[in-house]
Amino acid sequence: MTTFSVRRDIPAAPERVWAALTNASLLASGVTGITRLDGQIAAGAKLTLWTEATGTRPFALRVAHFDAPRQMRWEGGLPLGLFRGVRTFSLTPHDGGTRFEMSETFSGLMAPLIVKSIPDLTPSFERFAAGLSTLALKES
């Protein structure tokens, strides 16, 4: 398994951060590195995601877990568990604001081959966290 992650303290209440995190049009406004996000971010919803890091290649995802305003998980991949990506977003009250954590784990039989073609996602994750902080503060 390969995992990428980021953690950032955001000086806004978890509810503010959650509101930004679950607003598809805000996330796709360019500040987070997401260029397009189709679908409504809600429990069980299907999403299609495009990012600056992946260009024109879309990712089909499902909101597999939705526990407002604490945690959300997006999942996607290939059939039969050959390759799977699981992105987890966690918000925890911290020092009058929110500790935001995001991780993505890749697994499955084809993961060793596919992961070789995935660039280091750390800069993209850092950009997402910084962008989410900007969006949450604008909303406050």
Image (cartoon, grey):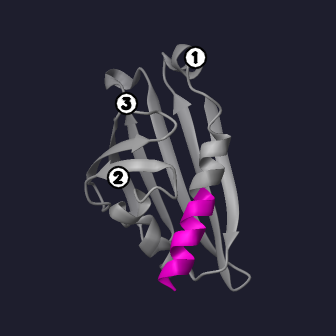
What's the magenta bit mostly, secondary-structure-wise?
helix
Residue 112, numbered label: 1
Quarter of the figure with residue 95:
bottom right
Q: Residue at x 30, y 62 (%)?
A: 42
Magenta stretch encompasses residue 90: no
* Amino acid, disc 3: Arg
Counting residues from the N terminus, which is met first, the one under dot 3 or under dot 1?
3
* Amino acid, disc 1: Pro
Q: Which residues are magenta?
A: 129-140
Counting residues from the N terminus, which is met first, the one under dot 2 or under dot 1?
2
Residue 26 appears anywhere in the view = yes
Counting residues from the N terminus, which is met first, the one under dot 3 or under dot 2?
3
Q: Are marks 3 and 2 in contact (CB under 8 Å)?
A: no
Residue 106 on image: x %, y % = 54, 31
* Amino acid, disc 2: Val
Residue 69 appears anywhere in the view = no
